[in-house]
Amino acid sequence: MPANPFEDSRIAAGTIQRHGLKPGMHTGPVESDAISRNDARDGAASLHNDRKEHRMSANLETMNDLFLDEIRDLYDAEKQLTKALPKMVKSSSTPELKSAFEDHLQETQGHVERLEEIFQTLGEKGTGKKCVGMTGIIKEGEEMIGDMDEGSLRDAGIIAAAQKVEHYEISGYGSARTHAMMLGHSEIASRLEETLREEKAADKKLNDIAQTMVNDQALGSSSSRSGPRTRTAGH
């Protein structure tokens, strides 16, 4: 059966558009060869990326691999927080909230050092892992803060965003501690448990500030404005 001329035309049009050519433009041997090389290079790059992703997922083959991946994720998350917490301090209006974030910044710096000690004990490096979960949580919080005026209502939003961070870390440290115990790393498990207790205490402090100070003020502030009531922080 002869080739479909309309199908051939569609394929040719797609190639022309992809390479920025205009219909009817003549391409000599040099241009055609360049297009072919570009197509081949794009295809090779796509195949390389697929194989790279496969190798990355295949690297986690043992419980020890999973544990290392977890604490590297936590390490990057804590380092991201050391940059985000000063912004929370600056954006907060309630003195008690500012103080809570300042205290937790010091704790977070200690968490980074504690994880570095763990990596040293294991003879491993902490680099090479990006905590995309923490990146997303921080970005979401920053966008919300940018949409609100300074005051108790924004403080309530900041607490809500900060508690998302704490819950993420509580979950991560809980799993890592359990896996460390399973692998026989009792001393490392104790260090992770210490950080876990501090994360839970930070979450409780934020909850107390929300329930005893910020929420009522935010509610009064939002009731004087038109529009739907804003959800306040705290459990």
Image: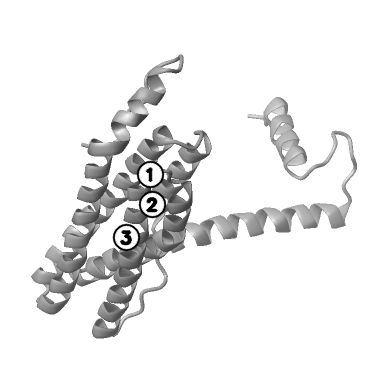
Picture layout, residue 109 above or below residue 45: below
Q: Which mark is residue 94?
A: 1
Residue 151, percent from left and from top = 45, 36
Compare marks 3 and 1 and give the one earlier in the sequence. Answer: 1
- Nearest the viewer among 175 and 195 is 195
| Residue 24 image-quadrant placement | top right
Quadrant where the image shows the C terminus = top left
Q: Contact, CB < 8 Å: mark 2 with mark 1?
A: yes
Picture layout, residue 219 above or below residue 93: above
Residue at x 85% of width, y 36% of height? 22
Distance between the alpha carbons at the discs numbered 2 and 1:
6 Å
- 136 displayed left or right of 193: right
Compare marks 3 and 2 and give the one earlier in the sequence. Answer: 2
Q: Nearer the viewer, mark 3 or mark 1?
A: 1
Amino acid type at circle 2 is Lys
Q: Which residue is mark 2?
A: 98
Check disc 2: other Cα within 10 Å, few if <14, some if 14-19, many if 20+: some
Residue 122, percent from left and from top = 24, 82
Q: Which residue is mark 3?
A: 104
Check disc 1: other Cα within 10 Å, few if <14, some if 14-19, many if 20+: some
Residue 71, percent from left and from top = 28, 67
Residue at x 23% of width, y 57% of height? 199
Residue at x 87% of width, y 47% of height? 27
The kind of secondary structure element at disc 3 is helix
Picture layout, residue 157 above or below residue 195: above
The kind of secondary structure element at disc 2 is helix
Judge whether residue 235 can be spotted in this image: yes
Distance between the alpha carbons at the discs numbered 3 and 1:
16 Å
Residue at x 74% of width, y 37% of height? 12
